[in-house]
Image (tube, grey):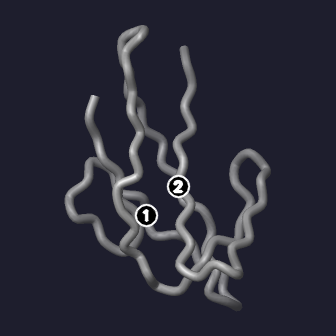
Amino acid sequence: MNFSWYAGQTNPGGTYWLSPTPEPGGDASTRFTYRDVTHSADVGASVTIRWDDHADWDGRWCNDTDSEGNTYNDTDHRSSIRAWVKYRYE
């Protein structure tokens, strides 16, 4: 299993690209963007998730509540990036 994600203002050729984050207006904060994908592996297979790059130094920051109800306000951290993978076993 091998695939890549890209997010932000450009996509240099990844398997998946997250659309640019919504801007609520009033300040330079942004909201979360989500993308559903499906991949399957054999029982007992090893899966590695690795952060590759951050190249979106636009001075904007995350200020939003995620789909699990957790609130993030990165006002003090300009050009913040928050990435995670939510998975489930079936």
Q: Residue at coordinates 35% horizontally, 55% vertically from top-left?
A: 52
78 w.r.t. 89: above or below: below
Q: Earlier in the sequence, mark 2 or mark 1?
A: 1
Quarter of the figure with residue 60 = bottom right
Q: Residue at coordinates 60% horizontally, 62% vertically from top-left?
A: 32
Circle number at residue 19:
1
Q: CA distance from mark 2 to mark 1?
A: 13 Å
Quarter of the figure with residue 62 = bottom right
Would you call the spot at circle 1 few (<14 residues within 10 Å), some (14-19), or many (20 or more)? some
Specify the farthest residue to the top. Answer: 43
The x and y percentages for residue 43 are 42, 8
The x and y percentages for residue 90 are 54, 14
Specify the farthest residue to the bottom. Answer: 26
Query: Disc 2 marks which amino acid?
Result: Ala
Q: Nearer the viewer, residue 36 or 75?
A: 75
Query: Disc 1 marks which amino acid?
Result: Ser
Q: Residue at coordinates 73% horizontally, 64% vertically from top-left?
A: 72
- Quadrant location of the N terminus in the rendered image: top left
The x and y percentages for residue 17 are 35, 57
Left or right: where does residue 37 sit relative to residue 26?
left
Q: Check contact, mark 2 vs mark 1: CB within 8 A.
A: no
Q: Residue at coordinates 53% horizontally, 66% vertically from top-left?
A: 81
38 w.r.t. 69: above or below: above
Q: Which residue is under mark 2?
A: 83
Helix, strand or loop at label 2? It is loop
Left or right: where does residue 42 sit relative to residue 14?
right
Helix, strand or loop at label 1? It is loop
Left or right: where does residue 29 sit relative to residue 84?
right
